[in-house]
Amino acid sequence: MLGDFVAAPSCSSAKTICGRIHEERPDQTNMAATIRKETSWRRRWKPDINSQAWKPFIISGNIFLVKTMFVETECCYEFCLWDFSTMWYEKVEQDNFRIRAKDLNPNVEAKLSFLFKFVQKSIEEDKEREETSFTINEDAACDDKLVIKMKTKLNAGVPFVWEFHCSVGEKTMVGSHLVQPMIAMIAELNRRQAELFTLLRKKDLEIMDYKESGVRLSRKSLATSEFDENAFNSKIILSQGFEDAVKDSVTKGFDDASCELYKQVMIKKAWLAEKDLPELDDDDDDDDDDELYGSVAYGAVGGPSAPSWTDLPPPSLLGKDDEPYTTSPKRSPRKTPVTSPSKSGMSSPAGSPSKDMELQRREALQKKLAEEAERKKRKKRKINL
């Protein structure tokens, strides 16, 4: 009877097994810490002209690409226009906006904030207005200047005119605003397609297992053939939809989903540029695990810095020390001291959070690992009996 039992592992073997378990834990902890750090950075990050998506814009019957950034609190804006050969750019501050509004509309008496919001809506709103027209002022056009004139009417029917005085943008703008983001979008869409293809193959195996178990469809119209990647690609290339997408690439390539992907790519690029900078204390963040994983996973771009959606650890693996902070957002962030008050000789009031946070994490992790090892040890003792 005793021969049927497996011999209990030696102390050295047990330590080796525990060591392997503990080696896996830091990787998951580091991933969770990286996700938490990026989520915290996204809360503090402020949008800029880089993260604004391009959209098709018709001027004098010709189609262009336009992106804008309006800041209502400061009454200033940035305007970018791509005519498929030159990048045009303009930045207008509050004083310049006031002067131009008065020069172009001397008979209009309105608050500056009202006129600013009106110009913003005229550019950003998707629906076309019959009383609004955009033209390029040929008289003022030259090699390095472009004037776009907008004629419209205010809510009371009062005529209103505005002009965008654009200059040729820097040479790097074409690459940073168009080429690089588009390449990143292609890479991300390829990654998503590969994962969807993998999911389809798994679904085929699941359906096959159901059929072998005797399950039948209630309606034959729901039946699908087994997915073939090569046949799918060949069919897509010869389809009418592919031809339409190539002909109308400007309008079809910048739908809502594409604009959102462009925005997330640019945010991810900004994060990659700042991820190695010193991290600020983030005690005033108050979000649950769903928001933590949902916001970051959606904006992930293919590459070593952004794991696949199937690789993200579940919230259960984070532990208490890795959970998002739950301090009230009204409290100002506190700075973490280099050493604890007891070691530095400094006195601190009772309950003050001045103890080194990293030391607390390590102590909690050591305690948790010790409890896990003790629990496994007790389990093995029961087997030996």
Image (cartoon, rainbow, N blue to C red):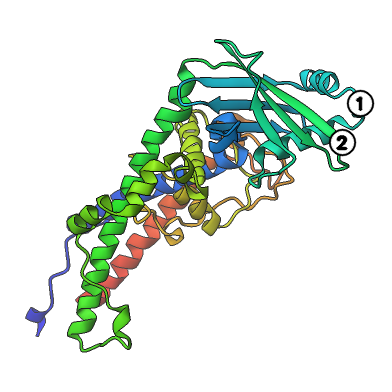
- For the residues labelled 2 and 1, say whether their Cβ atoms are less than 8 Å apart: yes
As helix, strand or loop, the secondary structure at mark 2 comes to: loop
Residue 154 against residue 101 in the figure, above or below: below
Residue flagged by tag 1: what amino acid is it? Asn
**In the displayed structure, does residue 114 sit left or right of residue 174?**
right
Residue 122 percent location from the top left of the image: 71, 38
Residue flagged by tag 2: what amino acid is it? Val
Disc with the residue nearer the chain's start (2 vs 1): 1
Label of residue 107 in the image: 1
The part of the image, by quadrant, that contains residue 287 is bottom right
Q: Which one is nearer the viewer's eye here, 283 or 93?
A: 93
Query: Gap between marks 2 and 1, in whole Å?
Result: 9 Å
Residue depicted at 64% across the width and 20% down the height: 90
Label of residue 158 in the image: 2
Residue 13 against residue 330 in the figure, above or below: below
Residue 36 percent location from the top left of the image: 50, 46
